[in-house]
Image (cartoon, rainbow, N blue to C red):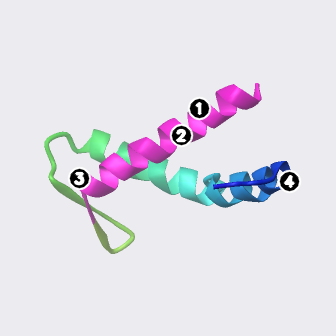
Amino acid sequence: MAIHPAQSEPINRAFTPSADEIAHAQRIVDVFEQNPGAGTVGIDGMMIDMPHLKQARALLALSKAMEARDD
């Protein structure tokens, strides 16, 4: 909870996904779309499953909402 308007900027910075996080999330979504029906996929030696996909989609939705807000 922020109690002063000056706290908004650092809070927004801390919770805004980085470009690398957005790219990784998009990669997860893309790999699952290329492998329909797969329960898990491998990316860079990591096992990625449905909770990761759900989190990636949520991060991308947040990123798009933030972009729309800034436009």
Q: Secondary structure at mark 2?
A: helix
Q: Name the residue beneath numbered marker 1.
A: 65
Main SS type for the magenta part?
Answer: helix
Find out whether the residues at labels 3 and 1 contact each other: C-beta distance under 8 Å: no
Q: CA distance from mark 4 to mark 2?
A: 23 Å
Q: Which residues are magenta?
A: 48-71
Q: Is residue 11 left or right of residue 51?
A: right
Query: Is tag 3's residue or tag 1's residue first in the polypeptide sequence?
Result: 3
Q: Name the residue beneath numbered marker 4.
A: 6
Q: CA distance from mark 3 to mark 4?
A: 38 Å
Q: Amino acid at mark 1?
A: Ala
Dot 4 alpha-carbon crowd within 10 angstroms: few under 14, some 14 to 19, many 20 or more: few
Q: Name the residue beneath numbered marker 3.
A: 50
Q: Is residue 49 left or right of residue 71?
A: left
Image coordinates for residue 37, horizontal then vertical, percent: 13, 42
Image coordinates for residue 35, horizontal then vertical, percent: 23, 45
Residue 62 got which mark?
Answer: 2
Q: Amino acid at mark 4?
A: Ala
User: For the point 38% across and 51% down, which residue is it?
Assistant: 55
Q: CA distance from mark 3 to mark 1?
A: 22 Å
The mark closer to the camera, 3 or 2, is: 2
70 within the magenta span = yes
Foreground of the two, 11 or 64:
11
Q: Is residue 17 left or right of residue 53?
A: right
Find out whether the residues at labels 2 and 1 contact each other: C-beta distance under 8 Å: yes
Q: CA distance from mark 1 to mark 4?
A: 22 Å
Q: Amino acid at mark 2?
A: Leu
